[in-house]
Amino acid sequence: MTQPQKASAAAVSEPKPMNIPDPSTALICAVDEIFDRSAIADKITSAAEKRTDDRALRGEVVQILMGAQKTGRAAIEAAFLAQPFDARPMTRAYTWLTDCLVGSAHFVATTILHPLATPTEGERIALLAVGGYGRGEMAPQSDVDLLFLTPYKITAWAESVIESMLYILWDLRLKVGHASRTVDDCIRLGSEDFTIRTSLLENRFLRGHAPLAELLNERLQNDLFLGSEREFIEAKLAERDARHEKQGQRYMVEPNVKEGKGGLRDLQSMFWIAKYVYHVQSARDLLDRDLFREDEHERFAKAENFLWAVRAHIHLISRRPVEQLSFDIQVEVAERMGYCDKGGRRAVEHFMQEYFRHATSVGDLTRILLTKLEADHAKAGPLMERLFRRRRRIKKDYKVIHNRLAVADDDSFLEDKVNILRLFEEGLRTGLLIHPDAMRLVTANLDLIDDDLRQNKEARRIFLDLLLKHGNPERALRRMNELGVLAAFIPEFEPIVAMMQFNMYHSYTVDEHTIQVISNYAGIEREELQEELPLSSEILERGINRKVLMVAMLLHDIGKGRDIDHAILGAQISRKVAPNLGLTKAESETVEWLVRYHLLMSDTAQKRDIADPRTIRDFAKLVSTVDRLNLLTVLTVCDIRGVGPDTWNNWKAVLIRALYRQTRVALEDGMEAITRENRGTEAKKKLRAELSDWPAKLLKKETGRHYDPYWQGLHITAHKIFAELLRDIEDNEIRIDLHPDEDRDATRACFAMADHPGIFSRMCGALALMGANIVDARTFTSKDGYATAAFWIQDGDGSPYEVSRLKRLRQMIEKTLNGEVVTTEAIKSRDVIKKRERAFKVPTTITFDNDGSEIYTIIEVDTRDRPGLLFDLTRTLANTNIYIASAVIATYGEQVVDAFYVKDMFGLKFHSKSKQNALEKKLREAISKGAERATT
């Protein structure tokens, strides 16, 4: 941390040279490359000698300083790009450049434009830098916060000086924040506003009347800071909590480097508190005052340096004061900082893993500092807990300090390695948070967690009890993970700690996702999610092997980050880890199966037509038992919910429930229970009951006009709607029914019209033009030549369309289907990939499956999603005379998997390899052309 410079003893009221001092510490490049003081002073002096009026001179000074600023910024940027981790010399360089510009403006204003030979006591000004500028920490786009300090009410001369200075600085396009105050003003306002107080805490004298600056610091210490330490600490911690609430309590994959959890503001808050309470002047003082150990001080310095480097690169890339490390910027920052693709992972993923590890360190260091504050009674204890919590009796090896669980005797604790795990067990048993001193003891002795401890039966028992016994496993796991205990006890877990997956689907790092999955399961067990997750709650009520499921959840993504299918590698790792945790051979085999197939149910439900009996039969054969089905269902639900806050929805819930119930029927009653014939007979029976008021002749016509796939592919509600749409329909008529399907979080769009080639593609185009996301689609042709198509669509927010928007949606669909809108042209302006999303690269994979359906070939297209993709794909298929029976769409952030159930023009599957290759080529061309259009 660059600290306030001591005020110079000499006043700068009388005319002197520019007198810009040398920087106090090394900069990232040579001083004269940043700002050539002698040359700039000569130019300004020359301009002053030739001036015709003050306004013209000010304009000329701005041009001189503008050129100097441009040169200086270019020199700093070039040096920083060559040394992309040298954050501290970089921030000091930007600070010194700003000092030079501000000093030059002050010189011009006080010496040339408004000289005052003999200023009175009231005509003295001290110029101070405050906030981040005062701290001496400036990023390329940082604000310049200035305090013009006067002894009394501002005079006309002082007002003229301030105005001239600000005009020069504004014309230099600096983002200047300024205040003109007396010392009394500063004390009064600082007592009322903690933001102002914090800004004043980091004031740094720049130029002007030094005694005034010294008086301010004396008054601040004696009249404002002294005795208000607890008040200041609570205010800073409240600000931190509010920031985390706004930015996200967990480590999000697009973090805010400045304001986010584990970001620069958290580091700065630590230092502000330490400075306010302990009067430290540098990060090194944290060590000297015994606030940090040597290794902790090193972690502080590394985290600070890394975060400042990242922030500066963001500013240089965006040329704006952007603090969000968005996906597109992450790629560029990783490249600038020299990260490379390796081990099956992209450079950006390695970069972000390091980012999150530093962010975790910041959280750990914050806890350590707060512990010291508690010990010194500076931070108030949690009052409500002190008053109302009934403390459980703790075991003899522990004690309670400030309502936190601490170790009674360090040496005794370390005599038995198992105590490291017992600490977390005692924390869950008593409900007490672990004292940071106990955490420090653990992190300093992680080397005790060796093979002997991993093989220890008591250690294994404790670890499984942490997962299964106390009802709050996520709390223990998260703290164990942050302290390095989890990765030490299960070394195979270490690679996924803080591992970021560079996509738009996952909201958390892999380790945090794993903990979120287990947290969801614990919520089901605590009966908190019965209404939201009735099926999973029902399964748990009937009984399930909790130990197997919990270990499978812990290990399900343990194979991520390598250039091999993570489910396969994870299963191999589980084969070793599960027995090491004390599971039996049978339990370990089930864990291995669950990890190997943890995506099976999700993929089947979202990427296949679960109305097709073959889909259910194939899935049931792989699952083989109801017990495995139950385990896999709960794991799947918790896994999807653990991806992000909004990933789980009613659509996925309906799919999972339908797949579960049909599979259970197949496993318990035999595969014949789900044949097409049985389904068709039952569906017709239900429709007759629903249409009991129809004339018998019309009812017979309706039940006889459709082929078998129609009856087994739709629910009775859709059968009834289509019956109404088809009743007395004319050949040139298009009938549409739009209805919110709240159970599925989608709008159901049903179409009935005379069939003709390409109709499915035109419907996809019409919906795309309205910005609709198609999540499922079925189309059927009746025996008398009518097309019936059902689409389930969502708006841009992933919700059903509001009723008020359905009229406009219907009008656009009708115009498109009637040929009034040419979709291929109209789609161009809508088929665009946003800039922040263009960094994502998804390789295109196209497969042909002739075994997954009895009637159709399943063409699965896995590629980069964009608004017009489905229209392009269906148009390509239509132009090749391919009949599309249904389309199942699964979206995972920027990735989409479209599965088309198709037949050729003769009603046959695509068995010919040459036909498959030709069709794949056409689909790839359509994808490539569309992607090029969407990014230009």
Image: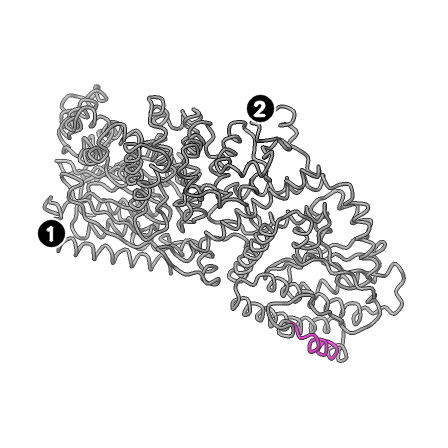
Q: Where is residue 470 in the image (x, y as percent from the top left)?
A: 47, 27
- The span shown in magenta is 35-46
Residue 813 coordinates in the image, percent (x, y) = 31, 43
Q: Main secondary structure of the magenta part?
A: helix
Horizontal side of 67 relative to 526 (left or right) equals right
Work out whether mark 2 precedes mark 1 in sequence or the reverse, and give the earlier one. 2
758 with respect to 237 (left or right): left
**Which three-letter amino acid code belongs to the residue tagged 2?**
Arg
Q: Residue 869 carries which label?
A: none
The 10 Å Cα crowd at callout 1, few under 14, some 14 to 19, many 20 or more, is few
Quadrant of the snapshot with the N terminus? bottom right
**Crowdedness of circle 2 by 10 Å Cα count: few (<14), some, many (20+)?**
few
Q: Is mark 2 on a helix, strand or loop?
A: loop
Q: Mark 2 points at which residue?
A: 393
Q: Is residue 38 one of those drawn in magenta?
A: yes
In this figure, which residue is indicated by the disc labeled 1?
A: 912
